[in-house]
Image (cartoon, helix red, strand yellow):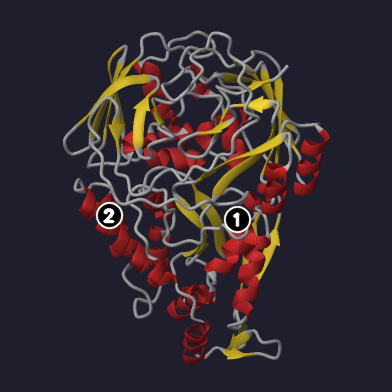
Amino acid sequence: MSSTPPARPRARRSAFAPLAAMAAVSALLLSGCAGTATSADSGATSDPVAGGELVVGVQSVNQLDPQQGGNNDGVAVQRQLVASLTISDPDNPGTTLPWVAESWEVSEDSSEFVFHLRDDAVFHDGTPIDATAVKANFDAILELGADAAGASQLLEGAETTVVDDTTVEVSFPSPNLQFLEATSTSTLGLISTESTKLSIEDRQNGEFVGSGPFQVESYTPEQEIVLTKVPDYNLSTEVDSNQGAAYLDSIRFTQIDEISVRSGSLTAGDIHAASFLTSAELDNFAATPGYHVVERTNPGTVFSLTPKLDRDTPLQELAVRQAIQLAIDREEVSRITYGDDAIPATSLLAETTPLYTDLSDELGLDVDAANALLDEAGWEPGADGIRERDGERLEFTVIFWQASDPLVAVQEQLKKIGVYLQITQVSVSESTARADQSDLQYANVSRNEPDRLRQDFLPYLPVWIEAGIDEAEAPDLAEIQAELDEQVGEQDPEARQELLANVQTQIIDDGYRFPLYTLISSIAVSDQVHDLKLDGTSRLTFIDTWIEQ
């Protein structure tokens, strides 16, 4: 699920630089650096102190099972509950490091992956994290299917084989370059073998046995989640400064719906940290003694609007989609969202994603050209300025749960070409229940792999093809699907990057997605709190965090 735009981006660019990917410490291909912009904490020089409860104000957590996915707040909780086979290096985007797996081999064509597990890894109940447990997890994810859509996409076509107690092989019917990085995600995090047999509802409520540095103490939906540390946790990685159990005794995630109330709670000292604040509030905390801000540019797909072309709306018309693409002022949308330091979308992928290509020339603003397209297509301005044709108004609905400022900006921009975007802001749960009523999906997904783009379109392309979009007005969607499938098997980095750039250009030019801005994860923190960090995919991590007593 998507995440709320939190705060202020800081741009970082570097040249394309491919890295090797076949060793125990393996790497993907790098086209941008981390974009990390993390302000310092209070600068205390004392050693970490164990104990205490960290209280974090969040907007919303919809469920606790990492394999079923969730919004950013949900993933912030889920990431603490499970370890994964590997971990993403926050200092070297695209580099994969050991976690539960201490080493691995990848076949020459990237279709077979053999992982050698630590022999001392255990779940919270003391049962071993062995090859049988890994197979049980991966098989169960595939059985969950659409109920674990993100995780099952990462394992599409996988066959998992137990070689011995500490060796597991995962094979695919064709090359699958994305899989090694996929094993670092929380969606492929590991729960106990018995937990994989639980009902979907029990897993959502956190009744599973996990493998991470924290475990669920209690969960009150739409109110709070309390996690307690695992005293015997021994799975620290080389990116953790703390090589033992967490310093914190517990973490309390308190749901506070209103942004202003979260900010006020941090100022009042009722909470130690607050996520998803406005740019102005974050600037204020960064400038106020006693507070600091932690932020990091998210890799993966940028925040975008994706038209649902299986719905019978004018969005099925190529000229309408092209006009919308031309009418969006991405500089303005990102500036309204984040302030003067914003990063507008320059492709479908964030600049910090491996194999990123700058496609900003394809995303220029041209209101005159947009109006001309709609005029030629027979859409005429009505009495209120919104275009009509054959009694149909040129209007669409987007139902979303995130902050409204970016979409309000898009709404005003589209009015200039006679298109009305009805924006309806609801709760997370209601947005899920009403997803079928929305003409466009508003979302991003964070991941250190450009194949995230293919996974974004996996649910859409076959449906759109079946819906029978007029071939005279739209390119061959099957060709786009084939190109996205081809890039995940392309071994040559330059060729893969070119494939990705070409297919993104086609998607942009024909309006299959309207990219808006790059997401930055940000959190305001009291200076009582030290070493609260964002990991390689800009997810909160608390293994190193401690509180002054």
Q: Identify residue type, mark 2.
A: Gln
Task: Name the spot of residue 193 as percent of width and height, x first.
Answer: 46, 18
User: Left or right: where does residue 213 sit relative to residue 277?
Assistant: left
Q: Quadrant of the C terminus?
A: top right
Label 1 to label 2, Cα distance in Å? 33 Å
The answer to whether residue 513 is above or below residue 123 is below
The answer to whether residue 40 is above or below residue 441 is above
Whether residue 383 is visible, yes or no, is: yes
Frontmost residue, 525 versus 463: 525
Frontmost residue, 74 versus 429: 74
Which residue sits at x=39%, y=25%? 85
State which mark lies toward you, 1 or 2: 2
What residue did someone put label 1 on? 435
Q: Residues within 10 Å of mark 1 (few under 14, many from 20)?
A: some
Task: Name the spot of residue 347 as percent of width and height, x first.
Answer: 41, 61
Figure disc tally: 2
| Marker disc for residue 497 | 2
The part of the image, by quadrant, that contains residue 383 is bottom right
User: Left or right: where does residue 220 sit relative to residue 116?
Assistant: right
Q: Identify residue type, mark 1.
A: Ala
Frontmost residue, 356 versus 408: 356
Badge 1 or badge 2: first in the primary sequence: 1
Task: Name the spot of residue 358 as percent of width and height, x first.
Answer: 37, 61
Which residue sits at x=45%, y=36%? 536
Q: Residues within 10 Å of mark 2 (few under 14, many from 20)?
A: many
Frontmost residue, 397 versus 282: 282
User: Left or right: where does residue 102 sit relative to residue 284?
Assistant: left
User: Left or right: where does residue 150 sit relative to residue 108?
Assistant: right
SS at circle 1? helix
